[in-house]
Each structure stands twice: as structure tokens, then as C-alpha cells.
Amino acid sequence: MFLTVILLLIGFLILIKGADFLVNGASSIAKKFNISSIAIGLTVVAFGTSTPELLVSVTSSLKNFNAAAFGNIIGSNNFNILFILGVAGLIYPLAVLRNTIRYEIPVSLAAVGVVYLLVNDTIFDSETSILSRVDALVLLLLFGVFMLYVYKSISHSADVEENSIKTYSGWVSTLLITVGLCMLVGGGTLVVDNAITLAHYFNLSDKLIGLTILAIGTSLPELATSAVAAYRKNTDIAIGNVIGSNLFNLLFILPITAIIRPLPYNNALNFDLLVLAAATGLLIIFMFTLSARKLDRWEALLLLAAYVAYTIYLIQID
């Protein structure tokens, strides 16, 4: 058990340093080529930090741990919105581009609704609920539309914070991103493997492991990346990473997993999907009405409190 804890801590350290490399490289590219930093956060950084979710969900599907596959993705998204944005917002208030509020966050909410309809086949008089390969293709089509939007939204007018981003040469920036992604994958795997060992030691159910241990473990890259970005006042990357990762999880990772093997769905997870919808809606309210396109520290604290309450509830009903 002592060795497990040590390996878990080593995994955390690898994740944090990997996130540091990734943010440095991505921010440098955004500044050097005048690429919108929110576009970088929604694509390169979001995909890189979502890699652990992909590995865990695909592996869970192949081993018939379907509840873990769904729980990992839904739980990761809840952790991203409530905990990661909460932490990042406490570090530094998150002011973001208008398009992020007007388009990306509502699109993320719509994606939750689409997934809810696709997985709840019993609504349409089916005896069982399953995410089929056809459903997966629908989600991938929506993912393609979103990526087309991101491509067209890339601005060639510099909008990154000039005084907080260090520029590296092209090959150094690429190396930083590559090494950072590798460290994120390696560190995430190390953390999740040893977290599962600890969870089994304490006799937690597979469903709870998926929604909490796996979800938190695979979201640590997003946590490290957004926290570092917030500390460096790269707020577009901090929030773009989270929203982009959530969209990647629902519209890319989930359907890829279902294409490999259709996923039977446990309707008990509907509650967690509704929590995700409520959390995303709360973020929209904070951004649209209570502050001028900014997540203030008190709002971030409310998100953190909501995640703590949600986690306590999950443990109590397990």
C-alpha cells in the first residue's frame, strides 16, 4: 500500500510538469503565429489532456466495464466544470472571449442533451438502453461540425496576453507540446492505476470508481493545465481547455468507445448527466448575467462547493 501511494504521488508530479510543458508550447505557438489562444485551448490542449479519458474508456469497453466507461466520461465532465473551473477561477478570475460564452459553452450544453437522448432508448419504447454504432456516428458527425467551426473561428489577430507568454522557436514549442502530452498520458495512467488499487482496497463499487476515482484521475491533466494557465493569466486556455475537453469527451471519446463495442447504458447515470447539464447551465448563468464575461472568485467557490456536495451524495448512495 505504501508503494501505491508513492507511485500515485509520482504520477501527480509527472502530470503537473507535463501540463507546464504543454501550456508553454501551446501558448508560444499562439503568440508566434497569431493563432487565437482559445482555438489552441479548444483543440491541441483539449485533445491532449483528454487522452487519458480515451485510453481508460476504450480499455473499460474492451473489458466489458461499461459503467466505468460511461462513468469515467460523465464524471470527468462534471469534475471539469465544477472542480477544475472552480480551482482555476480561485487562482485568477477567468475572463474569456465573447465567442466562448456565446457559442462554445452552449454547444457543450447541447451536446449533453444529445447524448441523453441517444443513450435513453427506453424513452422510445425500447426494452434496453444502449449507445449503438449508429448513435456513435451521429456524435462523430456533430464533432466534425464543431471542429469545422473551430477551424473557421481561428483568428489571425493577436488576442493573447503579450506580457505573460514566452516565445520559443518552432521546434522547441513542438517538442514541449510532444513531451508534455507524453508526460500527461504516462502520469495519468500511473495515477489511475494506483487510484484503482486504493479504491478496491476500500471496497468501492465499479460505478463509484468510474464517476470519481477514474474521472478525477483522468481529468488531472485538465486540472494541471487549467491551473497553470490561470496562474499565468492565460485565461482563454484555462477555460478553453475545459470546454474543449468536455466536447471531446462527449462527441469524440464516447463515440469512439461505442464504435469499438456498443455500450449498454445504466439509466441510473441519468442523474449524473442531469448534474452535468445543470453545471454547464450554471456556468452560462455566471458568465452571461452575474458578471461581464468573467468567472469571479465567489462564483468559482460555488462551483467547488457544488462538486463537494455531489461527491458526498455519490458516496452516500453507493
Image (tube, grey):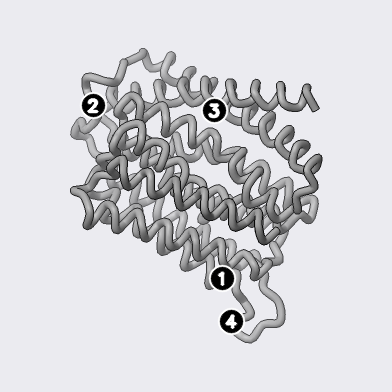
User: For the residue labelled by badge 4, is the local secondary structure a helix, a strand or a loop?
Assistant: helix
Q: Which residue is mark 2?
A: 161
Q: Do labels 1 and 4 touch, CB within 8 Å?
A: no
Q: Which mark is residue 118?
A: 1
Quadrant where the N terminus sits is top right
**Depicted 95 relative to depicted 145: above or below:** above
**Depicted 191 relative to depicted 136: above or below:** above
Q: Is residue 170 left or right of residue 314?
A: left
Q: Is residue 172 or residue 312 the one in the foreground?
A: 312
* Residue 165 position within the rendered picture, expressed as x and y whole percent measured from the top left: 29, 20
Crowding at dot 4, Cα within 10 Å, few <14 / some 14-19 / many 20+, comes out as: few
Residue drawn at x 19%, y 34% is 157
* Residue 52 position within the rendered picture, expressed as x and y whole percent measured from the top left: 61, 38
Distance from the alpha carbon under mark 2 to that under mark 1: 41 Å
Using the rendered view, name the quadrant where residue 260 is placed: bottom right
User: For the residue labelled by badge 1, is the local secondary structure a helix, a strand or a loop?
Assistant: helix
Q: Which residue is mark 3?
A: 181
* Residue 105 position within the rendered picture, expressed as x and y whole percent measured from the top left: 35, 54
Residue drawn at x 78%, y 43% is 202
Q: Which mark sits nearer the N-terminus, 2 or 1?
A: 1
Q: Is residue 207 left or right of residue 291?
A: right
Distance from the alpha carbon under mark 3 to that under mark 1: 32 Å
Q: Which residue is mark 4?
A: 123
Using the rendered view, name the quadrant where residue 126 is placed: bottom right
Distance from the alpha carbon under mark 1 to that under mark 4: 10 Å
